[in-house]
Amino acid sequence: MTRLADFLRRHGAAIRLAALVAAWTAAALPAQAQFALAVSPPRLELSAKPGERVREVIELTHRDARAGAYKIKTADWTLRPDGSVDFSDELLPGSCRPWVAIERHELSISAGRPYRYRLEVTPPPETPPVECRFAIMIEGQQATSAPGMPIALGARIAVIVYVAVGEAAPLLELDGTAVKKVDGKPTPVLRVRNSGNAHGRLAGLLNAKDADGTALEVQASTMPIMPGETRDIALQATRPGDPETAVAIRYPLSVSGKLEWGRKGSLAIEQRFTSP
């Protein structure tokens, strides 16, 4: 096995991201620089009316003393069951990228103030309620270095864009629960169905008690649930007042409360999870 293949085997999961995605493409050139671009925001969630133009700005901050040269384009994308993302330069069926206009395809940025990069989305008149989804791909034109890599890389960042056209909205429903292995650990999971026409996410904290009667708080993964999709959403348990530190769960785990989604939607949760 080559050093590159071994690196990808061991670190592939760390390379795949969901909302802000960094995709690495091997380049057979010596490493000369580091990818020094910060992008804000990492995700855009917009709304538009049919026939009306919506404009937005992405801030690009170059953090190297030398100017950075970048290529920018749009791409279609699909979300896999494991949360990784596939990008496509080709137009996928139903793609809304013909509605999208970007400021320019090549850009040189100097260190200092963020560059405000503009984009526009114009749904055609009479467009029915639908969610337009695409990505803005920003790629360095120079080979970059990465710790531990034997060769140089071409780095790119994807800003995921959602545009709800008209009354497009999610409709989330609980379709079951389970305890499944997530990152090698038994994890409570909500199976959520989206019968709406826009993506949705769960937000909020649930109250929980483990087998010892210890009070915990549970928060749901913010993984998007696409229209027409049923997806497993993992729950993470934490101590009250410390939502950043996950704790091991002693089953059975009783969970109750309400998770919010969309503008007005919510899911009432009253479940008991037992280890498999």
Image (spheres, grey):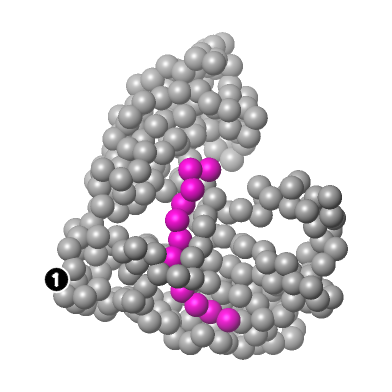
- Judged by its main secondary structure, the magenta piece is strand
Quarter residue 109 falls in: bottom right
Residue at image mark 1: 126
* Side of 4 where 242 appears, left or right: left
Does residue 43 appear in this view?
no
Closer-to-camera residue (35/175)? 175
Q: Is residue 130 left or right of residue 207?
A: left
Instruction: Estimate the x, y position of residue 269 in percent, counting from the top left.
Output: 34, 27
Determine which quarter of the picture holds residue 56: bottom left
Q: Quadrant of residue 194?
A: top left
Left or right: residue 89 versus residue 174 is: right
Neighbourhood count class around disc 1 (C-alpha, 10 Å): few under 14, some 14–19, many 20 upward: few
Q: Is residue 67 above or below residue 199?
A: below
Q: In the image shown, does 261 or 131 lie closer to the viewer?
A: 131
In terms of depth relative to the viewer, which is nearer, 165 or 61?
A: 165
Counting from the top left corner in percent of width and height, residue 223 is at: 46, 46
- Quadrant position of the C terminus in the picture: top right
Q: Could you say where residue 88 lies in the image, as x and y percent from the top left?
A: 49, 65
Which secondary structure, mark 1?
loop
Q: Is residue 35 above or below residue 104?
A: above
Q: In this picture, which residue range is highlighted in magenta?
A: 71-82
Task: Name, please, the residue furthest toward the left.
Answer: 126
Residue drawn at 84 percent across, 75 percent down: 30
- Does the magenta segment cover residue 149? no
The total number of labels drawn is 1
Label 1 is placed on what type of residue?
Answer: Glu
